[in-house]
Image: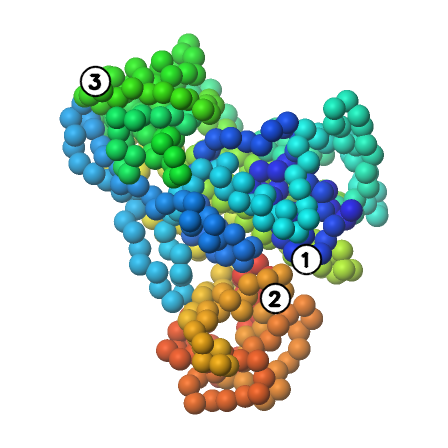
């Protein structure tokens, strides 16, 4: 075994898939005896959809999920209109999946587990990481299952084990931030069969008092809604308190809530680990950053932690450790920015701002970049690599994302008609304008979208990293 991953949520599953498809021996353990069954992180952002495209699960995620629903708003028991968190955006050549997609987290995890199983790796449930020690050549960990302890050896350990991370605590890494005990929110999955399941609902006392109400958002693939409502200090988390909110604020008497299948009480716990790496041990996902649910950023940020780390670990296992330090510098900066955004949206919600529920481009995570602070180019090293429609050597329509798909890097050689350069760990393609030819692997930029998206000149080479960001321009 070369990598041991503690925690089999979306972050751990994504990392395990990315490593397994590279042929890296991996074990994925989770102390929970059963798989999580609840919606929790039900919003999948556009950048995560692109990650899922590369990992081979996008079609199943799209088939199982649904677009963000229209919300029917009721204030003081009166219907006041329909709202969207964000108006749908049309796909563009550079951005094929521009909109948030809704799917309960447990269903997303099931799709990821099925994909992982295709590589011969299965989640080991009921298996806790008890302790670990590291040295210059690896990590020795003790796992516990059914009262039996097993000592294992791995080259690297990744803690994707949530906000109460055993890995982070064992390392003694501070989890800096705050917890607001004055605000408690009940989140859960519930049925409300009198409501049209194609819509979401917001029942509130008044527009400027949004915290005095309840929101229900339909979950794809069944009859349940994800529900969110404030919870007073002495109230129990259950159907009674939710029903009371509906009765008081909906203006209806026919809405009966049933079948509360998952419920949790959430407090604003906004934290960021001081470090994401200690030697051969890494933190990812909620173990590294804890987000409020506003903006739908937490699960997505964790998935992209894993997507950033996987190829770097694989390089290190092949003898090149030069990229490992960049995991912390790149992802911690992103997590800090996203935490700021989520916190700002939470503050707007609590304060009753008119645009508290509005979501724009800043939540879609397409603008995340690792570019150098002083680089102001149109498309710089560290930026997300855009998609573009092109045609292959046989004249069939394909996309740049089709070239990127897989564990390798991709070298795009714009206008190259001669022999292509070789790049270790990369596939090279010429990107040609109509009328140009070559015997080398190539695509034709029929409509000019690739040259435009990359602001590329004839003769320019662009290296796209395995995680879909620009690694070099020359």
Q: Going from the N terminus, do you reach mark 1 or mark 2 first?
A: 1
> Which quadrant of the figure has residue 170?
top right
Question: Please, is residue 441 above or below residue 155 in the view?
Answer: below
Measured as percent of width and height from the top left, residue 345 is found at 37, 37
Residue for point 32% across, 29% down: 215
Measured as percent of width and height from the top left, residue 365 is found at 44, 51
Q: Which mark is residue 409?
A: 2
Q: Going from the N terminus, do you reach mark 2 or mark 3 first?
A: 3
Question: Please, is residue 167 above or below residue 419 in the view?
Answer: above
- Distance between the Cα atoms at labels 1 and 2? 12 Å
Question: Crowdedness of circle 1 by 10 Å Cα count: few (<14), some, many (20+)?
Answer: some
Residue at label 3?
253
Residue at label 1?
22
Measured as percent of width and height from the top left, residue 131 is found at 77, 30
Does residue 293 appear left or right of residue 113 in this picture?
left
Query: Does residue 4 appear anywhere in the picture?
Result: yes
Question: Crowdedness of circle 2 by 10 Å Cα count: few (<14), some, many (20+)?
Answer: many
Residue for point 53% across, 80% down: 442
Residue for point 55% across, 63% down: 405
Quadrant of the snapshot with the C terminus: bottom right
Residue for point 54% across, 88% down: 438
Does residue 441 appear left or right of residue 265 in this picture?
right
**Secondary structure of residue under mark 3:** loop
Question: Please, is residue 381 above or below residue 278 in the view?
Answer: below
């Amino acid at each position: 075994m070369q990598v041991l991953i503690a925690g089999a949520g979306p972050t751990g599953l994504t990392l395990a898939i990315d490593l397994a498809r590279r042929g890296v021996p991996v074990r994925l353990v989770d102390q929970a005896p059963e798989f999580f069954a609840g919606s929790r992180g039900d919003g999948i952002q556009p950048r995560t959809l692109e990650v899922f495209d590369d990992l081979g699960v996008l079609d199943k995620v799209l088939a199982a999920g649904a677009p963000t629903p229209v919300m029917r708003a009721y204030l003081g028991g009166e219907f006041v209109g329909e709202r969207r968190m964000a108006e749908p955006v049309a796909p563009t050549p550079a951005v094929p999946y521009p909109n948030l997609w809704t799917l309960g987290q447990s269903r997303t995890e099931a799709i990821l587990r099925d994909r992982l199983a295709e590589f011969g790796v299965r989640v080991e449930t009921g298996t806790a990481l008890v302790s670990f020690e590291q040295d210059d050549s690896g990590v020795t960990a003790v796992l516990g299952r059914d009262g039996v302890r097993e000592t294992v050896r791995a080259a690297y350990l990744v803690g994707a084990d949530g906000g109460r991370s055993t890995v982070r605590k064992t390392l003694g890494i501070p989890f800096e931030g705050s917890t607001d005990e004055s605000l408690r929110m009940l989140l859960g999955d519930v049925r409300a069969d009198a409501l049209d399941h194609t819509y979401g609902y917001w029942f509130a006392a008044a527009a400027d008092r949004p915290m005095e109400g309840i929101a229900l958002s339909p979950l794809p693939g069944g009859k349940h809604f994800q529900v969110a409502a404030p919870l007073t200090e002495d109230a129990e988390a259950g159907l009674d308190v939710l029903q009371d909110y509906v009765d008081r604020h909906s203006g209806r008497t026919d809405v009966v809530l049933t079948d509360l299948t998952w419920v949790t009480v959430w407090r604003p716990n906004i934290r960021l680990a001081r470090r994401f790496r200690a030697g051969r041990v890494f933190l990812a996902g909620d173990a590294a950053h804890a987000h409020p649910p506003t903006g739908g950023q937490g699960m997505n940020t964790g998935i992209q932690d894993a997507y950033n780390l996987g190829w770097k670990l694989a390089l290190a296992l092949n003898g090149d450790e030069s990229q490992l330090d960049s995991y912390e510098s790149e992802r911690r900066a992103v997590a800090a920015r996203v935490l700021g955004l989520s916190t700002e949206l939470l503050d707007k919600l609590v304060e009753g701002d008119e645009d508290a529920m509005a979501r724009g481009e800043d939540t879609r995570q397409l603008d995340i970049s690792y570019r150098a602070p002083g680089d102001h180019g149109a498309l710089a090293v560290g930026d997300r690599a855009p998609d573009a429609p092109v045609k292959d050597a046989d004249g069939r329509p394909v996309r740049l994302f089709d070239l990127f798909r897989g564990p390798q890097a991709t070298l795009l050689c714009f206008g190259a008609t001669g022999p292509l350069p070789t790049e270790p760990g990369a596939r090279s393609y010429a990107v040609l304008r109509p009328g140009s030819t070559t015997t080398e692997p190539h695509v034709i930029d029929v409509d000019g979208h690739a040259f435009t998206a990359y602001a590329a000149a004839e003769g320019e080479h662009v290296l796209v990293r395995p995680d879909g960001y620009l690694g070099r321009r020359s």
